[in-house]
Amino acid sequence: RDVRRPLAYPRFEAQPLLTPAQCRKVRRRAASELQFTEATVGSGSVGSHGVKAQRGSRRAKFAGVPKTSFFYSQVYRLLWDRINATNEKLWRFAIAPGTMEFMQYSIYAASDLGGYSWHEDVGFHSETASRALSVSVQLSEGAAYEAKFWADGKVRYSQVVRSRWDFPRIGVNASRDAGQAIMFPSHVTHRVTPVTRGERHSLVLWLQLDTGSEVDRELPAPVCNVQVASRRISSVNMVELTYGRTDNCTMQDSIGAFVEAHGFPAQHQSSVKRQLGEAMTSKCGVL
Ligand SMILES: O=C(O)CCC(=O)C(=O)O
Ligand SMILES: [Fe+2]
């Protein structure tokens, strides 16, 4: 695969990605569905053997985010589209959908003085050594937490810095707005200052360098399996609905195409569409 020079090399790039309502949905689902464990340093989503909890530098609860569930696959899809477009304009790392690691949902709580001190995401061992890009999505409202800088007592949230050797360690504060995606090369030093009130939730995703085999592989479309039980369509009580954003179709388009493809009689179509729409929203969870 071609190696290309960067067009620009910012230390980080922040963009709005999710709406506050989408952040609320992600938080609500995560609270009921994800399995949280105490974070350990070096406990990335890959190769974390023999790592002990080091509560000094990383104090958070985190959970891996499944790629195949319909709801989260929409988040992976949104993130990939944005990261890919941004990477093409700036760093031009050789990444591919297949080199996305599992996302981590992290919760930093004031009760814990939750935070993560200066570090880089590139490891020396295992697959973390192949990390090229990191992304952090702010899931909490800025007003939901306060984070205090150790030394000067001022309230701020500092995410990405120029270098850990800057003295004094002057950070560039990233946005605290819900839904912001902060993208940065994985070697850039960053931290999460200790949360002193409330809770901060974030989604972190790492992209590894593609060794060449992944470049043409597409991200699979999110698949939503919904049951449709209706006396009017007695021959069909289980249907599989594919909702893909790849061809820019909306959920309504996708339902329409499905109804047509399965030849539902015209007089039943609006009722089938309504039921499918409701089932997708409630069961599969449309972002
Ligand atoms: O929570 C964040 O925004 C960043 C966390 C982080 O730096 C990491 O998990 O490597
Ligand atoms: Fe990090």
Image (spheres, rainbow, N blue to C red):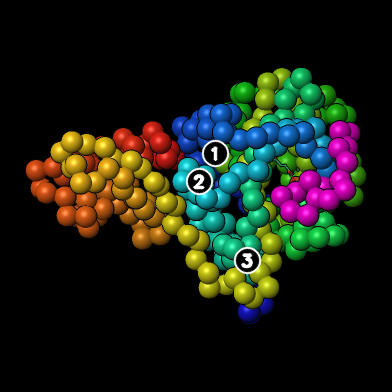
State the image quarter where residue 267 is shown. Answer: top left
Q: Quarter of the image containing the C terminus? A: top left
Q: Residue furthest bottom?
A: 2
Mark 1 sits on what residue?
Answer: 179
Label 3 secondary element = loop
Image spot of residue 103 (x, y percent) = 63, 47
Image spot of residue 92 (x, y percent) = 63, 68
Q: At x 33% / y 41%, what residue is drawn?
A: 227
Q: Earlier in the sequence, mark 1 or mark 2?
A: 2
Mark 2 sits on what residue?
Answer: 69
Label 1 secondary element = loop
**What residue range appears in magenta?**
42-57
- The amino acid on which the numbered mark 3 sits, given as a three-letter code, is Ile
3 vs 2, front mark: 2
Mark 3 sits on what residue?
Answer: 95
Q: Is residue 189 at all visible to an observer of this figure?
A: no
> Viewer-proximal residue, 25 or 34?
34
Q: Earlier in the sequence, mark 3 or mark 2?
A: 2
Question: 256 above or below 270?
Answer: below
Distance, label 1 to label 3, CA atoms, is 23 Å
- The amino acid on which the numbered mark 1 sits, given as a three-letter code, is Gly
Tell me the tag on residue 189: none
Q: Is mark 2 within 8 Å of ligand 1?
A: no
Q: Is residue 101 magenta?
A: no
Q: Is residue 224 at all visible to an observer of this figure?
A: yes
